[in-house]
Image (cartoon, rainbow, N blue to C red):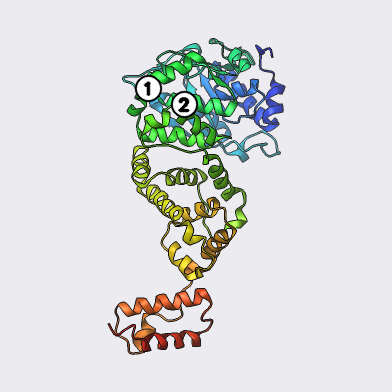
Amino acid sequence: MKMPTQIDPTRISDLLGSWTARLIDLVTSQAQLSGLSVFIVGGVVRDLLLARPNYDLDFAIEGDAITFADSLATQFGGSVTRYPPFGTAKWLLDINALPLGADAPDVPIAHLDFAMTRTEYYTHPGALPRVQSAGITSDLARRDFTINTLAFQVSPTYGALLDPFGGADDVRAGIVRVLHDRSFIDDPTRIVRAVRFESRLGFQIETHTRTLMDAARVRISQVTGERLRNELSLMLGEPDPAGAFLSMQKRGFLNAIHPAWRVDEALDRQLTAIGTITSRPGRMAGAAPIDPVDAMWVAILSTLPLPDLRAVGERLLFSKAVIATAESLHHLRADLPLLRDRAAPDSVFTARLDNVPELALVCAWALFDDTMIQERISHFFTTWRTLRPIANGDTLRAMGLRPGRCFSVILDRLRAAWIDGIIVSAADETQLIETLIAAGVCDE
């Protein structure tokens, strides 16, 4: 297909909806009134050429982006978050204050990003860049891949497609091509991004780019765990995250992050199962809302042997709570024979689930493809985990018993009996207490 040299306004309206098109027009008119050179840049331009909706609107400004964002908020409401070291600002929209007509947004857009056009340099591999003001061509030149170097101008004139690095041809050919030979050395997280774009768009990584990625593999060890985790978490939001992770593994990139890290072919099934947690909300009554990315990470880590799980979790700087949750799910995987034992009383099942983090239980419900297990976990959430006997310590003291280990033994036996349906009333409970006392549970 032939790539256009102009962006037709109707293309924006057709792909992103009329409300979004009017929002862009609002920014355009204010930029033109201010005499600024303003461009829409990044993935949204690439995706306009691919006819893919993308509502992540980034504006590059040859000038003071923060002041421009402030002026928009002053006139049209909302607030601005400023990042002076990078010359960038985020305009948080007040949708009700915008003069865009009464109809609701086609897709709610919470914010717009504005950045001064700039160049950047790295003091050492893996460091965050330092920036200085520059023109639009220099700004596009600092980006990662040619397909992300496209821009279209909205002010002072509207619609011209800027393509100084042949990005439109690579979009047409379906190629992920790195912009500079030092790109992966300067920022090794771009290796993850290359695989992510390859997976998302169904593109192929260009041969020379693959060579540069392989050469820079050892540099991944220089990147902080937090930056790597953030990039990999973005990968989990792609249409085929398992395919992307398996591609990372095949190319040796997971091993470069940590030698113990590996995933298997079952990853797709597992991540698909985790997706059911949020897509079928009624199935897990009693469970609190969860973060699907956290759930996917817990599932991924839990498949590793415990020492490797901890090592990979610590390399990626996960919190102790996330690592502990993954460990709990790992142990639940190991206890599947017990969980699948239909002869085991409900109280035994409950005792195994007590004190397990809720996220681990929700993941187990999704991952363990067994109706009985799912029903029992659901019942645990709705009933068993909060079920307590009528009697308590005061009740037992009133019966003349001295506090000690026998209190917990009696109360645990009472709870188990309620769960298993052995007792169904206060009278039953009293009788069981008397039976336990007569059996000598408090004689030690």
Q: Is residue 77 left or right of residue 255?
A: right
Which sits in the foreground, 356 or 226? 356
Q: Is residue 45 above or below residue 441?
A: above
Give the image quarter of residue 397: bottom left
Picture coordinates of residue 289, whole percent (x, y): 53, 53
- The residue under the point 44% across, 16% down is 211
Give the image quarter of residue 415: bottom left
- The residue under the point 61% across, 48% down is 279
Nearer the camera: disc 2 or disc 1: 1
Q: Which residue is mark 2?
A: 66
- The quadrant in which the N terminus is found is top right
Check disc 2: other Cα within 10 Å, few if <14, some if 14-19, many if 20+. Answer: many
Label 1: element kind = loop
Find residue 129 and name its label.
1
Label 2: element kind = helix
Check disc 1: other Cα within 10 Å, few if <14, some if 14-19, many if 20+. Answer: some
Q: Is residue 391 left or right of residue 382?
A: left
The amino acid type of the residue labelled 2 equals Ile
Is residue 328 at least partly visible in the picture? Answer: yes
- The quadrant in which the C terminus is found is bottom left
Give the image quarter of residue 252: top left
Which sits in the foreground, 152 or 240? 240
Is residue 156 at least partly visible in the picture? Answer: no
The amino acid type of the residue labelled 1 equals Pro
- The residue under the point 42% across, 51% down is 330
Q: Is residue 99 above or below residue 149?
A: below
